[in-house]
Image (cartoon, grey):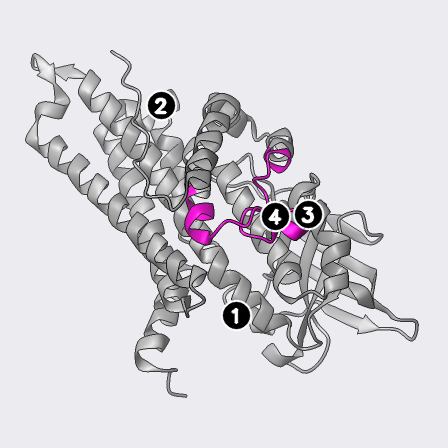
Amino acid sequence: MPDRAPQPVDRQLPTDEARDLISLVRDIAQHEIAPKAAEEEDAGRFPREVFTLLSASGLLGLPYDSEYGGGDQPYEVYLQVLEELAAARLTVGLGVSVHTLASYALAAYGSKEQQVEHLPAMLGGGLLGAYCLSEPSSGSDAASLRTKAVRDGGGEWAITGTKAWITHGGVADFYTVMARTGEEGPRGITAFLVPGDAEGLSAAPPEKKMGMKGSPTAQVHFDEVRVSDDRRLGEEGQGFAIALAALDSGRLGIAACAIGLAQAALDEAVAYATGRRQFGRPIADFQGLRFMLADMATQIEAGRALYLSAARLRDAGRPFAKQAAMAKLHCTDTAMRVTTDAVQALGGYGYTADFPAERYMREAKVLQIVEGTNQIQRMVIARHLAGPESR
């Protein structure tokens, strides 16, 4: 079967610097990430050295202030970098998105002193972060979390509880942790920056997942983990608002990763369909398959336009929570449809591990779940349209 290399996405980028950045990312993706993706995902191997390379290349702090080691890039550009990384390997693209999410609380709500002390290492010093909101008994209902932080008389907090479904759990260098410091409900939650080597912090064995096996997802246990008050981020009781603000931006990251994964699946389907011959001609000549490919491409372009529109609102300082929920909903549903169709386009070969389509399909499913299920996204969108639900 002849090899047909996918054409790079023709991106609308605002500056020459952004175009150079995308070229750098494509080079890293092509030479350092994609060649090992299938083998390492099958083995469940986490590519820590790739994140070290991305950090050294300035790619772990793109949307943050260059004063602290960030890249000063608008979300419009940062998200397209995520898309390129996710197309090469979702574990990497999603990992960068989670690291950015974990850095948000400090970058947006930390004091100047906290930012000077911690952000440079987080954004460009080789560190990797994790975001700790969900718990075994509080997923979508995050405001009911039970992990507690209790202040002692010496200016420290003791954190006790268990967080669940933590990407980079057990391998992260720092954890942004939401813990209860006051009353029940959202007003009693505070955010903390916890070092990964803190005494009393441990991780359970990684979950055994249907996809993204190279990305460790684990429960993280806090057994009276002590942190000083200068690692509290924002005001006491502000943690839930910080968490939601972080998730608005994080959902755009998930949307971009979903479109990257879908694009990789489409590229695989096109390459197969134009190279596979049946009845004396390429199967891409048959209308049924041609229309399937056309629908896949259209859904991807629509998703890309949607997440970029939301990103531009964010970059302009305008409200974007509704559009972020729409982007997360549409793009992840698109990734599920497109990867399923890619398996179908490859026929029996699509169902084998000899081709990446089956891996793309398994990986797509989690994107409809993480950082707010798509059912939650529909609730968020509806609230913006019709107001809160009646009680």
Left or right for 364, reference 95: left
User: What amino acid is labelled 2 in the image?
Assistant: Phe
How far apart are the two marked residues, 1 and 2, measured between alpha carbons? 38 Å
The residue tagged 2 is: 355
User: What amino acid is labelled 4 in the image?
Assistant: Gly
State yes or no: discs 4 and 2 in contact (Cβ < 8 Å).
no
User: Residue 383: percent from the left, percent from the top?
Assistant: 36, 77
- Closer to the camera, 44 or 69? 69
Q: Which mark is residue 70?
A: 4
Camera-side mark, 2 or 3: 3
Q: Residues within 10 Å of mark 3 (few under 14, many from 20)?
A: many
Quarter placement of the C terminus: bottom left
The quarter of the displayed image where residue 373 is located: bottom left
The span picked out in magenta is: 54-80
User: Residue 122: percent from the left, percent from the top?
Assistant: 68, 47
Give me the residue at 38% from left, 20% from top: 354
How far apart are the two marked residues, 4 and 3, measured between alpha carbons? 9 Å
How far apart are the two marked residues, 2 and 3, measured between alpha carbons? 36 Å
Camera-side mark, 4 or 3: 4
Q: Residues within 10 Å of mark 4 (few under 14, many from 20)?
A: many
Camera-side mark, 4 or 1: 4
Q: Which mark is residue 141?
A: 1
Give me the residue at 65% from left, 48% from top: 129
Residue 69 seen in the figure: yes
Q: Indicate which disc, 2 or 3, sits on the residue closer to the N terminus.
A: 3
User: What amino acid is labelled 3 in the image?
Assistant: Met
The answer to if 67 sits in the magenta stretch is yes
